[in-house]
Every structure is written in structure tokens, then in C-alpha cells.
Image (cartoon, rainbow, N blue to C red):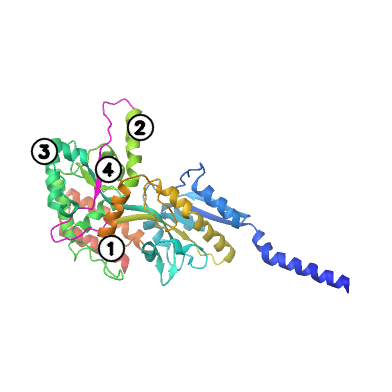
């Protein structure tokens, strides 16, 4: 009887170990595709920090990752991995790219997997929630506004009005004064249309003229019916008056940001999170080559985009990344992948990201930025709202490349404003059908 009791006891312990730990001890491999792997203050990378935390929960988890190719600003790497049958378990990238995969057919609803969803601001979670299912985690991001070169404005004698009086007419007045002094050397603003990369730096002009992109429910675009032709008419006036660099339709966003850092643009769309990096980039370029060019940082501030007549407020872009988990149907794999996604965007990671001058999406993260412009930009977003261009919609990645070929023709004068907005409307609606 005693031997039987011991046998039963041993069997019970064995079954308990298997139930509680045996399955967990099996190695689980998850893959991640991320748009960048930045170093953290402790010297480790983002993936290293997240993986270390993951191993506290799942010691035998194996994490493999790839860096997304962003040279074309598209889902190039993700599409290639899917075509090869290697869908990553975790995908972290710009929301305009990840939104393509935030659909029930691909994404894992995170409600029952991520343990700190209550720490995210409701406003940033709303676009990522479909029928009550959380389909992605919002990383810190940037409220994008108009960066104004105060030194250049002082140089040309333009008195910057208050934000309330910052209108398109005032903007054009400023452009004319820059041209009068620096004809062909500096410009009122920047422009580019070589590809889709950085298009958000241009598209905020639609909000300046009171244009809305979509009807409620995103069934069709309202970009034409709400006055989009006025935007193209405005763009063509910038070309005709030499208020933007010549051949802007053939320029890429990389050229644009260099012009900004060189102090050649009086007022143009930018992120505060970019300013220091591009200042340093231009400074290093000057130091590392023999040139007569000089370098000097300029004073700047941020304003909303100027408002056209009849427009009360101009909403701002908010750009961030989203972490999406692939629904494999295997509970253990999905659990490990979701926990990795959680640690890629927890309070520690967001606080570290805030050092790069971005706006946080979590309540429990402290903003460590010392930039005096972050409160300015945050207030612009609070006062004017966020411009809805469909970033979180699954068709956004297909709609996005429709614009820049049309914009090229607008800037070259090959299409009238009415022809251009009609073509853009048709291109968008074709993807929404």
C-alpha cells in the first residue's frame, strides 16, 4: 500500500511538472521584422532589451529578427517574406505600412495576450481597435507641424504673426520676401515628389485648405468634393513664382531635409525628432569634405500649417509605428510573440524613445526629452486635432503610392488642378471598392 501511494505521488508530481512546465520548456522560435533597431541608453539595442525581458517569462524562447528595407518607403521586405512563406510573428513599422496587415485574416487580437493595454492612451488605441479587437500597439511618434526658420525670417524682414493669424496669404507674403532677397538661393518652402517616401511632409497642405480625405466609414474619398483642386492650384503657384526649389517634382525627401538643415527653407513641414539628427548630418558633411560652404544652426519654432480663407483650424499629422502580431493559430507561439511585442513598446522603451523628442502613447512612461519644442508641438495637436488620412486602414499602403506620380505632373504643369484632383480621386476610390 505504501509503495502504491509513493507511485501515485510520483505520477502526480510528474503530471504536474508536465502541465506547468513541460510545455513551456519546449523551445519556441519567433521571428520579428522591425524598422530599425536603435541603441538604448544602457548600450544594448531595442531587440536585445526586449528579448532579455521575454526570456524572464519564456526562458527557452528563440528570437530571430530582420531589419526592414525602407529605401522605397514601402512594405518591400514584408511582402518578400510573405511571398517566401516566412511571415514574421512580430512586425513593427510605420503605421502606414503595418496597417495593411492589421486585419482579422492576419493579425492576432491582443486583448487576451498583452497585459498592459490599459496603460495606452485611449485616443491612440481607437484607430487600432476593430470591432473591439486590439490589432496593434502604438509606439511613440511625432506630431508633424510647420518648422519656421526664425533667423531667415528676421534676415528678410518678415514679422511672423501669431498662430491664429498664420494664413496662406501671410505664408505667400513671406515667400515673396524670401525670393526678393535670395532669388534662387533660398526659398519660402520645400517640395518633392520623386517617390512616396516622406509624402506626409507634403500632404498636410490638404488640411490647410479644409480638405478631408474620406467620408465617414471610409467608403470613398472626399478629397475632390471638399476642395482638393485648390491645393494643386496653390502648388502650381509656388512653382510659377519660384517659391520652391526648381524641378521640385524630381527631388526626393532626402534632398528636402538637407535643404532644411542648410537653412535654405523659410517654413516647411518637419518633425522636432528630426531636427538634431539633420543638423548633425549636415554639420558632419561639411567637416568631412573640402568645401567653401559654411554651417550654422538657426533658431526655429513650430506652427500649424497656415490656413486658407474660410478654414478655422488646420489639423496636424501624427506619425508613429505600430507593432502587429501574426495570428498563427498556435497558442504558445502567439503568446510568446505577443509578449515580445509588449516588451518592444513598454514604458522603459517609450521613455528611452522620448529622448529622441517624440510624443508618448503610454500613460506610465515619463517624457525625458529636454526639447522646449515638444510641448509646443503637443499643443498644436491638442488645439487643432489630428488629420485623418486613413493611416490605420488596411488599404492605406495601396492608396499611398497613388499620389506622387500625380503630384509630379502637377508640379511640371502637365495636369490642371481639376484634372489632377479628378485623377487622384479615381485612383483612391479604385482601391476602396
Per the model, the C-alpha gap separating discs 1 and 4 is: 26 Å
Residue 234 in the image, given as x and y percentages of width and height: 15, 53
Quadrant for the C terminus in the image: bottom left
Mark 4, residue position: 256
Camera-near label (3 vs 4) is: 3
Residue 428: mark in rendering:
1
Query: How many C-alpha atoms fall within 10 Å of the one at disc 2: few (<14), some, or many (≥20)?
Result: few
**Nearest to N terminus: mark 2 or mark 3:** 3
Q: Name the residue: 59% across, 54% down.
A: 55
Magenta region, main secondary structure: loop
**Nearest to N terminus: mark 1 or mark 4:** 4
Residue 29 in the image, given as x and y percentages of width and height: 59, 56
Query: How many C-alpha atoms fall within 10 Å of the one at disc 4: few (<14), some, or many (≥20)?
Result: many
| Relative horizontal placement of residue 60, taking residue 262 as reference (left or right) | right
Q: Secondary structure at mark 1?
A: helix
Q: Secondary structure at mark 3?
A: helix
Per the model, the C-alpha gap separating discs 2 and 4 is: 17 Å
What residue range appears in magenta?
Answer: 289-316
Residue 180: mark in rendering:
3
The reply to whether dot 1 and dot 4 touch (C-beta < 8 Å) is no
**Nearest to N terminus: mark 1 or mark 2:** 2
Quadrant for the N terminus in the image: bottom right
**Nearest to N terminus: mark 3 or mark 1:** 3
**Nearest to N terminus: mark 2 or mark 4:** 4
Per the model, the C-alpha gap separating discs 3 and 1 is: 39 Å
Per the model, the C-alpha gap separating discs 3 and 4 is: 21 Å
Mark 2, residue position: 284
Residue 150 in the image, given as x and y percentages of width and height: 21, 41
| Relative horizontal placement of residue 47, taking residue 386 as reference (left or right) | right
Residue 87 visible to the viewer? no
Q: Name the residue: 19% across, 61% down.
A: 210
Camera-near label (2 vs 4) is: 2
Amino acid at each position: 500500500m505504501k509503495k502504491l501511494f509513493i507511485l501515485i505521488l510520483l505520477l502526480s508530481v510528474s503530471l504536474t511538472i508536465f502541465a506547468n512546465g513541460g510545455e513551456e520548456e519546449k523551445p519556441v522560435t519567433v521571428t520579428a521584422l522591425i524598422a530599425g533597431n536603435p541603441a538604448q541608453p544602457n548600450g544594448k539595442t531595442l531587440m536585445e532589451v526586449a528579448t532579455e525581458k521575454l526570456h524572464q517569462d519564456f526562458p527557452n524562447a528563440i528570437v530571430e529578427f530582420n531589419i526592414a528595407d525602407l529605401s522605397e518607403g514601402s512594405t518591400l521586405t514584408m511582402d518578400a517574406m510573405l511571398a517566401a512563406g516566412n511571415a514574421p510573428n512580430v512586425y513593427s513599422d510605420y503605421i502606414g505600412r503595418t496597417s495593411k496587415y492589421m486585419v482579422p485574416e492576419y493579425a492576432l487580437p491582443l486583448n487576451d495576450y498583452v497585459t498592459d493595454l490599459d496603460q495606452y492612451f485611449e485616443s491612440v488605441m481607437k484607430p487600432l481597435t476593430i470591432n473591439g479587437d486590439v490589432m496593434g500597439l502604438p509606439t511613440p511618434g511625432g506630431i508633424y507641424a510647420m518648422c519656421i526658420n526664425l533667423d531667415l525670417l528676421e534676415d528678410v524682414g518678415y514679422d511672423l504673426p501669431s498662430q491664429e493669424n498664420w494664413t496662406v496669404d501671410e505664408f505667400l507674403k513671406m515667400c515673396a520676401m524670401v525670393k526678393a532677397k535670395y532669388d534662387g538661393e533660398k526659398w519660402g518652402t520645400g517640395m518633392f515628389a520623386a517617390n512616396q517616401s516622406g509624402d506626409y511632409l507634403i500632404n498636410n497642405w490638404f488640411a490647410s485648405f479644409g480638405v478631408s480625405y474620406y467620408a465617414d466609414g471610409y467608403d470613398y474619398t472626399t478629397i475632390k468634393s471638399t476642395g482638393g483642386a485648390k491645393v494643386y492650384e496653390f502648388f502650381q503657384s509656388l512653382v510659377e513664382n519660384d517659391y520652391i526649389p526648381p524641378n521640385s517634382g524630381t527631388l526626393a525627401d532626402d534632398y528636402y531635409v538637407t535643404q532644411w538643415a542648410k537653412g535654405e527653407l523659410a517654413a516647411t513641414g518637419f518633425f522636432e525628432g528630426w531636427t538634431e539628427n539633420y543638423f548633425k548630418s549636415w554639420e558632419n558633411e561639411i567637416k568631412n569634405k573640402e568645401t567653401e560652404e559654411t554651417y550654422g544652426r538657426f533658431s526655429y519654432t513650430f506652427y500649424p500649417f497656415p490656413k486658407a480663407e474660410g478654414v478655422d483650424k488646420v489639423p496636424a499629422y501624427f506619425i508613429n509605428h505600430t507593432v502587429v502580431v501574426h495570428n498563427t493559430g498556435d497558442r504558445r507561439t502567439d503568446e510568446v510573440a505577443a509578449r515580445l511585442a509588449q516588451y518592444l513598446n513598454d514604458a522603459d522603451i517609450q521613455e528611452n524613445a522620448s529622448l529622441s523628442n517624440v510624443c508618448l502613447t503610454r500613460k506610465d512612461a515619463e517624457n525625458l526629452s529636454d526639447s522646449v519644442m515638444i510641448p509646443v508641438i503637443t499643443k498644436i495637436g491638442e488645439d487643432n486635432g489630428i488629420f485623418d488620412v486613413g493611416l490605420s486602414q488596411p488599404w492605406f499602403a495601396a492608396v499611398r503610392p497613388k499620389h506622387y506620380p500625380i503630384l509630379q505632373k502637377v508640379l511640371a504643369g502637365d495636369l490642371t488642378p481639376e484634372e489632377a484632383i479628378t485623377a487622384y480621386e479615381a485612383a483612391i476610390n479604385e482601391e476602396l471598392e
